[in-house]
Image (cartoon, rainbow, N blue to C red):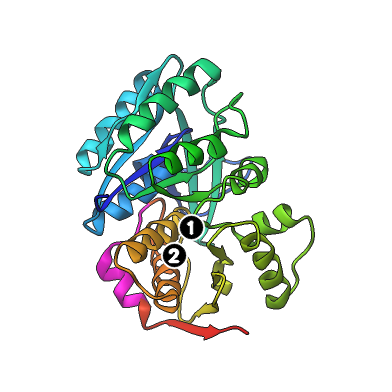
Amino acid sequence: MGQYVVTVTLNPALDKTVVIDKFEVGGLNRVKNMRIDPGGKGINVARVLTGLGVAVQATGIIAGSQGQLLKQYLAAEKISESFVTIPGQTRTNLKVVDANSKVTTEINEAGFLVGKVELEKFKEHLEQLLDNVCYLVLSGSLPPQAENSIYSELIGIAKGKGVHTVLDADDAALRLGITARPLAIKPNIHELEKLVGRSLTDDNAVLCAVREIIDQGVEIVIVSMGAEGALVVNKDEAYRVRVSSMIAESTVGAGDSMVAVLVYALLNKFSLSETARWVTAAGSATAAKPGTEVCNLSEIKQFLANVQVQRQS
């Protein structure tokens, strides 16, 4: 099995980020600057992994002229890709950054329709891609009409190839995905609350919820908590991670950076405590950047000094 990663983005996007001095709802807003990035959670993971020097291929489903434009942006960033093209039009997501308040407003399109025939075509494509792959990353929302069980099915395909899966999803796609026993998941605190069906008001409650998931066969759970840090748990250890001296510019891509660095840590055989430090530093480094920019290795290393890791009983 090679040191090679495949990321899946079933509902990719072109992410258009505009920066405005002060966002006025219902008023005229003039754009200070603008950028377009290839978007979607799996694509963000591929962007970070590429920057870390990991051999990665981004795949998923694209459509129309927007999909072809997305491929051009990936090529410009030297990200290897192998997308399946179907009829329709790849979506555009708008990120409005208020430079005054440092608040980002996201306006995301739903995406094009993907039916059973298209998903079967993609599953066949993915199975061919998974030869000599060590990790598969499944991330993000599903396109309209896609079955919520699709991630569970893709995890099954990966297992048949001896490939470990990291899953970053929410709602029914996450719940059903867990039944296929991926190696790791990365819910945020709100997704975890929906998954277990109750409010999680303190660290002990979060840890109890995570251990319920690990009892179902997931080996590693990372719960991202925004400015409050993260909780990183396996069946033997649990670590509460906090970050000091960090001012968030945009949270877009922060969770994806955590997923990417989890894979990087697994490839480099980090201990769980070191993994906890690195994934939290990565999320913080990306959150400190504007718009949809993601972190690089030097920025992650700079943020490691701001990360405190405490073992939980």
Label 2: which residue? 283
Q: Residue furthest right?
A: 198
In the rendering, at what x and y percent does residue 186 appear? 53, 57
Prevailing SS of the magenta stretch: helix
Numbered disc 2: secondary structure: helix
- Horizontal side, residue 214 vs residue 117: left or right: right
Residue at image location 40% in from the left, 58% down from the top: 257
Q: Residue at x 37, y 83 (%)?
A: 305
First reached walking from the N terminus: tag 2 or tag 1: 1
In the image, taking residue 230 as reference, residue 258 lies left or right, namely left
Q: Is residue 40 visible?
A: no
Any part of residue 148 in sight: yes
Percent x, y for residue 207? 66, 72
Q: Is residue 268 above or below residue 68?
A: below
Residue drawn where x is 51% and y is 22% of the image: 112
Across and down, in percent, residue 239 comes to: 54, 78
Circle 1 is placed at which residue position? 255
In the image, residue 205 lies at what x, y percent?
73, 72
Quick check: 163 above or below 85? below
Per the rendered image, the range of residues in magenta is: 293-303
Residue sitting nearer the eye, 82 or 294: 82
Q: What's the residue at 47%, 84% (across, down)?
A: 308
Residue 16 placement: quadrant: top left
Classify 148 as above or below 53. above
Camera-side residue of 145 and 235:
235
Marks 2 and 1, how far apart at CA: 6 Å
Q: Residues within 10 Å of mark 2 (few under 14, many from 20)?
A: many
Q: Amino acid at mark 1?
A: Gly
